[in-house]
Image (cartoon, rainbow, N blue to C red):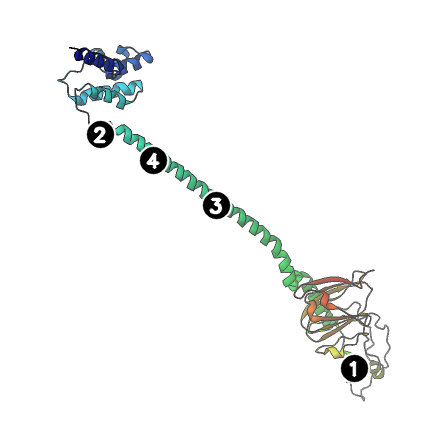
């Protein structure tokens, strides 16, 4: 007798704490009222009868109607009200009118998992794309810096390694002047010395003596500072033999043949070398490519502006004193003024 009331009270307390499961019609009605729609509005939008909409909200489902149609009505109603379809279907299955379908119950969880996987894949894709983009930008920046360095270095290297090309225009102009001068040069003095003694030669008269030094004569004779002295058709052999040109250059000579006092400046070339020499007045007194073994004495107004394409192949004397050429770097064009002012 005493145990039955306790059991009844225990059942009542459990029932009080059990929350009722919301039914699909209640969920749909609450959502419809929240959107301030009437059953007539819903019926018009879903193209259903108003009575059918009211029966759905009252949880009156006709067992004669196939479950496929009932679930279709619930999905359409939930989609119209923008509430989760799975929640409405789960409440429908709780009524026990139809056995729940596994794919319907699991669709929501699978969709959530798929969305999580997609978001992770998207994040990974963004990270990889950012790394690739940063690598491309860094590579382009390094290439641009490398091209700038090459652009600044190439002109200097070209001028140092190829002095003949750097001054091609000047050398070509000088060569043209040399060729014209050669065509107009009178018979050499040595030919006068070799003339026969019996040949009748009129008494020579020298109208002008050579005052300035000749520029070096090589395979291609360069232009002299001043034209050679004008000589009458015949020249006294004794005069020619005893008074040769004071600054005559010599080809295919050795360094022992150099006379340091032959001119204000004296050059000896141990290899082919491009030169350009101007005196203080700005006059070009020597230029072009000088061959191996060439001795070149020069006279002009000091100081001299000197350019040597290969200074390591040149020996130089100034007023009898030898100039130290080791101060110039091998393989580089030397540009300097001599003598060096104070």
Alpha-carbon distance for marks 1 and 4? 107 Å
Between 153 and 106, the one lying in front of the other is: 106
Between 288 and 73, the one lying in front of the other is: 73
Displayed quadrant of residue 243: bottom right
Quadrant the C terminus occupies: bottom right
- Secondary structure of residue under mark 4: helix
**Dot 1 and dot 3 residues touching (CB under 8 Å):** no
Residue 15 x, y percent position in the rendering: 23, 14
Q: Which marked residue is nearer to the observer: mark 1 or mark 4?
A: 4
Q: Residues within 10 Å of mark 3 (few under 14, many from 20)?
A: few
- Secondary structure of residue under mark 1: helix
Quadrant the N terminus occupies: top left
Q: Which marked residue is nearer to the observer: mark 1 or mark 2?
A: 2
223 relative position to 156: left or right: right
The tag on residue 337 is none
Q: Mark 4 = which residue?
A: 117
**Dot 4 and dot 2 residues touching (CB under 8 Å):** no
Displayed quadrant of residue 204: bottom right
Query: Taking the image as drawn, is residue 289 in sight?
Result: no
Alpha-carbon distance for marks 1 and 2? 124 Å
The tag on residue 103 is 2
Q: Earlier in the sequence, mark 4 or mark 2?
A: 2
The tag on residue 192 is 1
87 relative position to 266: left or right: left
Q: Mark 3 = which residue?
A: 135
């Amino acid at each position: 007798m005493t145990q039955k009331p306790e059991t009844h009270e225990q059942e009542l307390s459990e029932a009080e704490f059990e929350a009722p499961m919301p039914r699909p019609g209640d969920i749909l009605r609450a959502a419809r009222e929240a959107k301030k729609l009437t059953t007539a509005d819903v019926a018009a939008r879903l193209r259903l009868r108003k009575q059918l909409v009211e029966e759905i909200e009252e949880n009156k489902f006709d067992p004669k109607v196939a479950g496929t149609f009932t679930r279709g009505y619930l999905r359409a109603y939930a989609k119209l009200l923008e509430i989760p379809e799975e929640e409405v279907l789960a409440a429908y299955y709780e009524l026990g009118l139809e056995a729940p379908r596994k794919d319907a119950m699991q669709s929501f969880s699978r969709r959530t998992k798929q969305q999580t996987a997609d978001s992770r894949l998207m994040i990974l894709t963004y990270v990889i794309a950012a790394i690739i983009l940063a690598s491309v930008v860094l590579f382009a920046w390094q290439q641009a810096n490398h091209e700038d360095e090459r652009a600044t270095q190439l002109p200097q290297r070209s001028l140092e390694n190829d002095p003949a090309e750097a001054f091609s225009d000047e050398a070509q102009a000088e060569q043209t002047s040399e060729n014209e001068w050669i065509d107009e040069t009178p018979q050499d003095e040595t030919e006068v010395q070799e003339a026969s003694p019996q040949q009748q030669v009129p008494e020579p008269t020298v109208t002008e003596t050579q005052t300035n030094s000749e520029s070096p004569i090589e395979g291609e004779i360069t232009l002299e500072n001043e034209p050679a002295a004008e000589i009458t058709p015949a020249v006294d052999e004794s005069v020619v033999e005893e008074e040769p040109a004071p600054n005559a250059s010599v080809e295919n000579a050795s360094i022992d043949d150099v006379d340091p006092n032959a001119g204000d400046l004296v050059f000896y070339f141990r290899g082919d070398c491009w030169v350009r020499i101007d005196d203080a007045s700005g006059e070009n007194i020597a230029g072009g490519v000088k061959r191996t073994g060439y001795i070149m004495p020069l006279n002009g107004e000091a100081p001299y502006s000197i350019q040597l394409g290969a200074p390591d192949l040149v020996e130089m004397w100034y007023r009898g004193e030898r100039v130290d050429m080791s101060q110039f770097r091998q393989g580089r064009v030397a540009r300097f003024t001599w003598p060096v002012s104070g």
